[in-house]
Amino acid sequence: MSIYSGHRIQDHEAFILCELFPLIMGHARASGTPSEIVIVTAFLHLAAILKNKGLSCGTLLECIDAAPLAMYNAPKGFH
């Protein structure tokens, strides 16, 4: 995965929070599906893509553990 050195995940937070997250939440509302189900479904598909590109399951778990989770503790109304 050294081809990704020099790239920072923080550079993409605005895309995640302002574009991707609202799409996921909007789909959950429109389909009457709990947001957690849509989030997990999106995560599983994205994780499978990463695994197919060579990312090991262990590395994926390390990335999850290292993620700055404080930004996802938004007030209930924001979710």
Image (cartoon, rainbow, N blue to C red):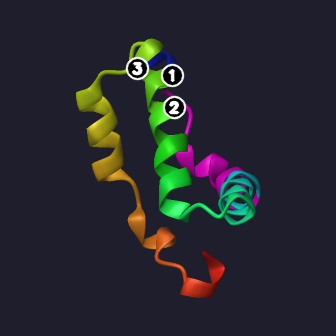
Relative to 50, residue 62 above or below = below
In front here: 2 or 12?
Answer: 12
| Label 1, residues with CA under 10 Å away: few <14, some 14-19, many ≥20 | few
- Name the residue rendered at 46%, 77% in the picture: 73
Q: Can residue 1 be seen?
A: no
Label 3 vs 2, first from the N-terminus: 2
**Is there a contact, CB below 8 Å, between mark 1 and mark 2?**
yes
- Name the residue rendered at 56%, 34% in the picture: 7
Position of the N terminus, as image quadrant, is top left
Percent of width and height locating residue 62 = 27, 40
Question: The magenta stretch spans which residues?
Answer: 5-18
Residue 51: mark: 3
Is residue 12 one of those drawn in magenta?
yes
**Amino acid bearing label 3:** Lys
Q: Name the residue that disc number 2 marks.
A: 45
Q: Spatial distance from mark 3 to mark 2, Cα to Cα?
A: 10 Å
Which secondary structure, mark 3?
helix
